[in-house]
Image (spheres, rainbow, N blue to C red):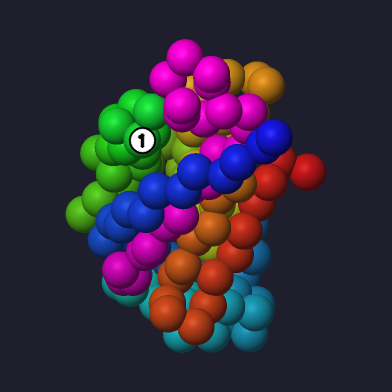
Amino acid sequence: MRVTVSRKAHFNAAHRLYRKDWSDEKNDSVFGKCNNPNFHGHNYELIVSVTGKINPDTGYVIDIKDLADIILDEVEKPFDHKNLNLDVPEFLDLNPTAENIVVVIWNKIRKRIDTDKDLEVILYETPRNFVSYKGE
């Protein structure tokens, strides 16, 4: 029997969508107001889900406190109240779109989750705009 355990979290961060190798006109055409040179911010919401077999000794798939600590260390501390483009090393040369952010988060968390468990990360950029990644 496999069960999914999920934990919600959030962080606030600024970013700018643009490519350094494109002209200002092309960046404006593709990214619109998200290309604001002064950046813009979001109140990101995150759902991290771990799926696996229930440990017969503990009754857990994963200790939710451990999952909360992983999210705190890998996402909240390094991303919260940061400018993703300037303050987060993973985005120095990677456009911080929601799609790229969710993959970066998944990769950071994946290395801390046992390999016999599946991981899914859902990232809400706004209440209506969200992306998910399962490592596929």
Q: Nearer the viewer, residue 86 or 55?
A: 55
For image coordinates 68% across by 46% down, the residue present is 134
Q: Position of residue 104 (x, y in %)?
A: 54, 42
Residue 101: percent from left, percent from top: 52, 52
Q: At 46% from the left edge and 55% from the top edge, which residue is drawn?
A: 47
Q: Position of residue 31 (x, y in %)?
A: 57, 78
Q: Which residues are magenta?
A: 41-62
Dividing the image into 4 quarters, which one contains the C terminus?
A: top right
Q: Residue 124, how many percent across, how many down? A: 46, 68
Q: Which residue is mark 1?
A: 64
> In the rendered image, is residue 76 in sight?
yes
| Closer to the camera in the image, 54 or 6 | 54
Total labels: the figure holds 1
Q: Quadrant of residue 52?
A: top right
Q: Residue at x 33, y 70 (%)?
A: 42
Q: Is residue 121 left or right of residue 1?
A: left
Q: Residue at x 31, y 57 (%)?
A: 10
Residue 130 belongs to the span the image colors magenta: no
From the viewer's side, name the closer residue of 83 and 57: 57
